[in-house]
Amino acid sequence: ARPAESATLTARESEVVNLIADGKSNAAIAAELSLSEHTVKRHVANILLKLDLPSRAAAAAFSARHTGPDGP
């Protein structure tokens, strides 16, 4: 399997990637999850690394492909 298919995100990383897919900025995600913007940036970096993705847009597309209409 490719790394993106076998990677496991933490529950928090899954929340973050779903919010990225909703088009939210790091600042908006931080506010919604009561985190610092720095923490959100780290989560985003970890998501991109774990899923071997080049960008937030790719993470959003990944999320859209791997979640159902009612969420993950």
Image: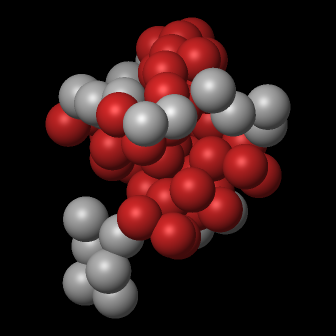
Farthest front residue in view: 1
Q: Is 55 left or right of 6, judged from the image as shown?
A: right
Residue 25 can be seen, yes or no? no
Instruction: Quarter of the image for the N terminus: give it.
Output: top left
Specify the quadrant of the image occupied by residue 67: bottom left
Which residue is found at the position 34% from the left and 88% from the top?
A: 69
**With respect to residue 46, does 13 lie above or below?**
below
- Percent x, y for residue 62? 57, 56
Q: Residue at x 51, y 34 (%)?
A: 2
Residue in front for this viewpoint, 14 or 5: 5
20 and 3: which is toward the camera: 3
> How many tags in the picture?
0
Q: From what the image shows, is residue 27 above or below residue 69?
A: above
Which quadrant holds residue 31? top left
Q: Quadrant of the C terminus?
A: bottom left
Residue visible at 51% across and 69% down in the picture: 65
Decide: is 29 above or below 3.
below
* Quarter of image, res 14: top left
Q: Position of residue 59 (x, y in %)?
A: 63, 47
Image spot of residue 47 (x, y percent): 51, 27
Q: Position of residue 44 (x, y in %)?
A: 57, 27
Classify residue 50 as left or right of residue 28: left
